[in-house]
Image (cartoon, rainbow, N blue to C red):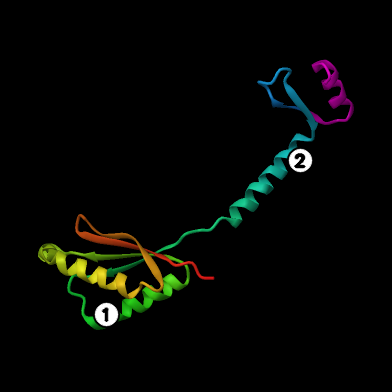
């Protein structure tokens, strides 16, 4: 423990910076370091942590309330591929004009999709009507 004037002299002598680490401590805690090098290493650490963080991608699949079987199977195949690649899936039924009267059909379609994709992912949010869209989210299952 050095008085502040002596600590400054030590830092000046070593051509480094005197950095206050804990100002609320009694007496305040200071450290003699190269501040620019410290900032550089801190940025480097943050960048490394950021690169390790997983990025979640959301893929969308759009259906109509009266999507026929062939189109449904085609889109289901894409949904399986998206889930196997580790992306979340946002499946929605879009109601145009007066087709909102078929909202039961839209819900049945989404629940059928959820049931058929059960081995690839789990339903994160059940079908929910938001405006003219009925939306459902499916998250991929963790692969070992």
71 up-or-down from 110: above or below: below
Q: CA distance from mark 1 to mark 2?
A: 59 Å
**Considering the numbered disc 2 on the image, is that residue within a helix, a strand or a loop?**
helix
Q: Which residues are magenta?
A: 1-17
Q: Residue at x 86, y 21 (%)?
A: 9
Name the residue tied to disc 2.
37
Residue 71, numbered label: 1
Residue 20's tag is: none
Q: Nearer the viewer, residue 104 or 10?
A: 104
- Disc 2 crowd rating (10 Å Cα; few below 14, some 14-19, many 20+) is few
Determine whether, in the image, residue 81 is placed left or right of residue 103. Answer: right
Q: Residue at x 74, y 24 (%)?
A: 29
Q: Nearer the viewer, residue 118 or 63?
A: 118
- Given residues 140 and 15, the one toward you in this image is 140
Q: Is residue 109 magenta?
A: no
Q: Position of residue 88 (x, y in %)?
A: 41, 64
Query: Which of the 4 quarters of the picture holds residue 75?
Result: bottom left
Q: Residue at x 28, y 68 (%)?
A: 62
Q: Position of residue 31 (x, y in %)?
A: 78, 29
Q: Is residue 107 above or below residue 8?
A: below
Which of the 4 image quadrants contains residue 89? Answer: bottom left
Q: Per the image, is 13 magenta?
A: yes
Q: For the residues carrying marks 1 and 2, which lies nearer the camera in this image?
A: 1
Query: In x, y percent, where is residue 108?
Result: 20, 70
């Amino acid at each position: 423990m050095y008085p502040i004037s002596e600590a400054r002299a030590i830092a000046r002598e070593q051509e480094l910076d005197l950095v206050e680490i804990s100002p609320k401590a009694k007496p305040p805690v200071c450290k003699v370091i190269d501040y620019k090098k410290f900032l550089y290493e801190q940025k480097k650490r943050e960048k490394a942590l950021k690169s390790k963080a997983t990025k979640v991608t959301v893929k969308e699949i759009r259906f109509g309330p009266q999507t026929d079987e062939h189109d449904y199977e085609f889109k289901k195949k894409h949904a399986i591929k998206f889930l196997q690649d580790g992306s979340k899936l946002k499946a929605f039924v879009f109601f145009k004009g007066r087709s909102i009267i078929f909202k039961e059909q839209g819900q049945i379609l989404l629940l059928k999709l959820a049931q058929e994709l059960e081995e690839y992912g789990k339903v994160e949010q059940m079908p929910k009507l938001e405006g003219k869209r009925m939306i459902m989210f499916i998250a991929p299952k963790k692969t070992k």
